[in-house]
Image (cartoon, grey):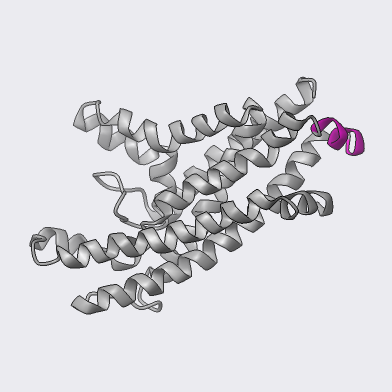
């Protein structure tokens, strides 16, 4: 774990990617919140009643998840690209332990970065919403869960990306896979009949994970799973992918 921490913190791209993560969730969330305030009068009563000020201010997670996904992929794929993975496995022959160390270190970094950024995004968004007196407070029911949940969502997404990077090994291919699972698959589901959409969409990785945040700008139509049930489904996806990655690490050559 000390070695993996050294690898992660001594690469310049790590800091740039984490900076993009923080800027994405704060700045993009603020832009979306400001846009909602500008069009608040034109929103119908039903839309106003369904508005979740805490979750909406965290809508910048949509950009932040892409940055976290890229970094999660590169934590493993970059070593395959450079060939340094051979040295890693020579120093630590127990390959699943290497994956576990990478997951622990990167997951912690992603969780801390995501949580701090989501706190900043929340207070920035509520300051903007205060112009219409529709802001939420950190002590309101479900608000703290939404804020902490955004950080947890990014951390688990990063672990899912790490698993895909381990399985695919190629940076470009793994990033495409992450984008496909998170962005393309929900769009594809919109072509299904409405009854199928309502039954299936909520169980997709992105929709299930977002349930812990709440109804953001990018929440799928229909009902989300309950917050912790949805997050449990999202964690199950990541755990399954990490398990498959650990198995394939032992079966394939470096």
Between residues 253 and 199, which one lies in front from this camera angle? 253
**Residue at image point 32% right, 77% down:** 127
Q: Is residue 211 magenta?
A: no
Between residues 136 and 239, which one lies in front from this camera angle? 136
> Quadrant location of residue 69?
top right
**Residue at image point 64% right, 49% down:** 13
Q: Which residues are magenta?
A: 85-92
Q: Is residue 9 left or right of residue 54?
A: right
Query: Which x, y percent locates residue 230?
Result: 43, 48
Query: Which x, y percent locates residue 112?
Result: 60, 63
> Quadrant location of residue 160?
top right
Give the position of the C terminus as an image quadrant.
Answer: top right
Number of marks drawn: 0
Query: Which x, y percent locates residue 76?
Result: 69, 37
Q: Most extreme residue toward the right, as rendered?
A: 91
Between residues 36 and 200, which one lies in front from this camera angle? 36
> Quadrant location of residue 166?
top right
Q: Is residue 91 magenta?
A: yes
Q: Is 111 situated above or below 167? A: below
**Residue at image point 58% right, 58% down:** 111
Query: Which x, y percent locates residue 29?
Result: 36, 61
* Secondary structure character of the magenta stretch overall: helix
Q: Is residue 196 left or right of residue 104?
A: left
């Amino acid at each position: 774990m000390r070695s993996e921490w050294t690898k992660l913190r001594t690469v310049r791209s790590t800091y740039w990617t984490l900076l993009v993560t923080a800027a994405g969730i704060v700045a993009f969330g603020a832009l979306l919140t400001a846009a909602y305030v500008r069009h608040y009068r034109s929103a119908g009563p039903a839309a106003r009643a369904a508005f979740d000020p805490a979750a909406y201010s965290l809508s910048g997670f949509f950009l932040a998840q892409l940055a976290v996904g890229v970094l999660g992929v590169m934590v493993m794929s970059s070593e395959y690209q450079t060939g340094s993975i051979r040295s890693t496995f020579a120093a630590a022959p127990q390959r699943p332990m290497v994956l576990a160390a990478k997951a622990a270190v990167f997951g912690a970094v992603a969780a801390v970065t995501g949580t701090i950024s989501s706190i900043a995004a929340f207070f920035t968004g509520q300051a903007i919403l205060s112009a219409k007196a529709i802001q939420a407070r950190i002590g309101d029911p479900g608000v703290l869960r939404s804020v902490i949940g955004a950080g947890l969502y990014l951390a688990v997404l990063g672990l899912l990306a790490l698993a895909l990077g381990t399985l695919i090994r190629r940076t470009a291919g793994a990033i495409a896979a992450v984008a496909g699972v998170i962005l393309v698959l929900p769009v594809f589901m919109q072509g299904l009949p409405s009854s199928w959409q309502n039954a299936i969409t909520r169980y997709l990785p992105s929709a299930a994970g977002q349930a812990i945040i709440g109804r953001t700008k990018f929440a799928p139509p229909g009902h989300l799973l309950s917050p912790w049930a949805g997050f449990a489904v999202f964690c199950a996806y990541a755990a399954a992918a990490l398990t498959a990655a650990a198995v394939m690490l032992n079966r394939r050559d470096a």
